[in-house]
Image (spheres, rainbow, N blue to C red):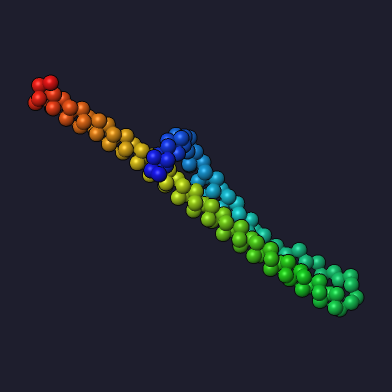
Amino acid sequence: MAVAWVAVLQMVPWGEVIKNAPKVADGAVKLWNSVSRKKSSESGQSNTTGVVLATDIGAIGRLEHQLFEAQQAIVELQSQVVQSAEVIKELASQNTQLVAQIEANRKAVTVLGVVVVLAVLGAVVQAVILFGA
């Protein structure tokens, strides 16, 4: 199982992932800023005209109720968009940290591999010297 993970991780172009991680984080920050700005600027606007064309009081009440429900749905959707942008921003930040840690681990494993090879080579040389093969 571990061999399969190593094979998958070796196929990932880590150089490209690391190079593009800041772009992903910047994009998430821009999205967050854009969404939060839109929400604050749109919350103060009201486009009601006060013109009533229908004479049926029941119809007017139903329309007002539908309008109120639509406005509530819009506010809820705007809140969800802001929350989604916040989650995306946080995920991009975590992705950047994860990529940096994976790169550090990759370098550490490479150094460890070199040390192991040198230790094995030293042990072989010492065995040859001791046993006079």
- The residue shown at (9%, 25%) is 131
Mark yes or no: residue 37 visible: no
User: From the viewer's perspective, is residue 67 above or below residue 93?
Assistant: below
In the picture, the quarter occupied by the C terminus is top left
User: From the viewer's perspective, is residue 109 above or below residue 49?
Assistant: above
- The residue shown at (57%, 54%) is 85
- Is residue 18 found left or right of 57 in the rendered image? left
- Is residue 10 found left or right of 115 in the rendered image? right
Foreground residue, 126 or 113?
A: 126
In the picture, the quarter occupied by the N terminus is top left
Which residue is situated farthest in the bottom direction here? 57
- The residue shown at (42%, 42%) is 5
Foreground residue, 3 or 122?
A: 3
Which residue is situated farthest in the top direction here? 133
* Residue 121, image x, y percentages: 20, 27
* Residue 98, image x, y percentages: 42, 46
* Residue 81, image x, y percentages: 61, 57
- Is residue 106 found left or right of 55 in the rendered image? left
* Residue 6, image x, y percentages: 40, 39
- Is residue 72 found left or right of 109 in the rendered image? right
